[in-house]
Amino acid sequence: MARPRPRARLLAAAGALLVVCATVTGPRLGPGSAAYGLAVGLVLAPAAVIVPGLVGTAQGQQGRLLRALRERGDAAERARRLADSEARIHERSRIAAEMHDLVGHRLSLVSLHAGGLELALEGAAPQLREEAVLVRRTTRDAMRELRQVLGVLGPLARDTGPDALTHATGTRADIEALVAQSRDGGIAVRLDWTGPDLDARPAPVRRAVHRVVREALTNVHRYAADAHVTVTVEHDTAVAATGEAATAAADGARVRVTVRNGARPGPPAPVEEPGTGRGLTGLRERVELLGGTFEAAALPSGGFRVAAAVPAEPAGPGGGPAARRADDGPGTLTAAGQGAIGTDPTAPEPAGPGPDGRRTAEVLTLGFGLAALSALMVIGIAFVYAAQPSGRSGPPPLPRIGMTYAEVAGYGVLDNAAVRAAATGHEPPRPAGTTGCVYPFNGATERHPGGLLIARYCFDAAQRLIAIDRFDVPSVRDATPWETP
């Protein structure tokens, strides 16, 4: 914020300079004297210097105040969102910890008792030992799945389990490891990878690719273990550019994942435990949240096809630059790679009127201000011109002896027949050499009690004024009119 004292001094100095310049140049360039120039300067100083300076100062302070308030509001909103996100993350972590302590403890006891039962039945009842082994393995699987679910509830930095989100999740090495695990399980799987690796892509994109491939291979293990499987990952090569070209190309770049298995060579094997269908539904939701498309359907040849297309740089809370910062600490991504619980604190705020609207308003305000200022200056100068002193100040000049008749008439001294008639018989003798006299009315005839004061201007043969006489003429008093009661 600018200090008010230098600004006030600057305005006062500019106004004083304008008054001095008008006072000095008024007698030389203007139609009046120094007093007239001073009056013009006093009118122009507020209109041309002080008022615009105060308006500009108020406008600048208002702009700075609005920017400060907007920045303060943005900071408060970001702080509120961060606080809400942290509160939700802490609550989820607390729920995960309680579930792990309660349910995990019970499952650990079940697994422990199942192991003891397995050892006890090894010699006593070998036919029941397999049931104890099944119980122990099922408990172990349940414990592992519980850890995976708790990793989804907890923050990203505290993910647990073999499927925790890491920097390698969804990369080519990760997908190759999934394919190798399925191949070790007896499934004929082939991986076709097109394009660069996904290590530079946001975590939600890599997580979605990982989950699509893993879920599809899990379904193949359950329903078509002896079928041939093809895993295809297509990553657009346009993203290899750098700079502005990379940003423009990445807007349309996509990652396409397709897992296709053929038909079983024999009759379909009975499924001991049918699935709930939640896996494919969860994949569809995950992909659509990122702005992609998901398809899962049986093929006419008897196989099954799972296909997903995910934007390489998804917009919104789940992708873009905010998603790349997810691994730096508690942020806007959960362990499942989905969007944040709340809104991304770094997302831009909805803006009010755009720059064009504000610029138009400022231009209109400036135009109206200049028009009003010009009108004020014109009115002030008009008043000064109207009030300027004329060259003929004081009472009108009187004729002097020796002036010609034309010069005397120029002062408004003209003969009046009524005044001449009133002076007849009451005037003093005319001076010697007089050839004619003028009896004016304006400026020379005065009325006083009992008569009139009349002026007489006498001229000689050369029409030169030779005498100015003043004399009294008595007034006539009539009787009271008979109409008066």
Image (cartoon, rainbow, N blue to C red):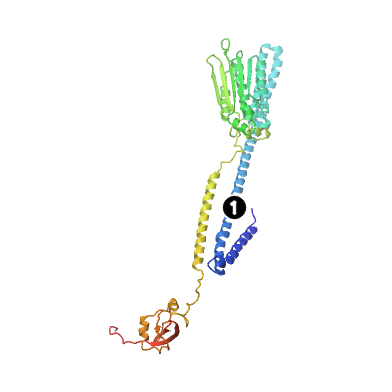
Q: Quadrant of residue 219?
A: top right
Give x and y (percent) for residue 377: 52, 61
Which residue matches tag 1? 60
For this rendering, which residue is in front, 144 or 22?
22
**Above or below 10: residue 273:** above
User: Which element carries disc 1, helix, strand or loop?
Assistant: helix
Q: Residue furthest left?
A: 482
Does the image show residue 421? yes
Q: Residue furthest top?
A: 266
For this rendering, which residue is in front, 255 or 28?
28
Q: Quadrant of residue 98?
A: top right
**Above or below 99: residue 20:** below
Give x and y (percent) for residue 370: 52, 55
Q: Residue furthest front?
A: 462
**Above or below 178: residue 9:** below
Residue at 52% of width from left, 49% of height from top? Answer: 361
Give x and y (percent) for residue 375: 50, 59
Is residue 380 rendered to the left or right of residue 93? left
Circle 1 residues within 10 Å: few <14, some 14–19, many ≥20: some
Amino acid type of the residue that numbered disc 1 sits on in the rendered structure: Gly
Is residue 11 rendered to the left or right of residue 411? right
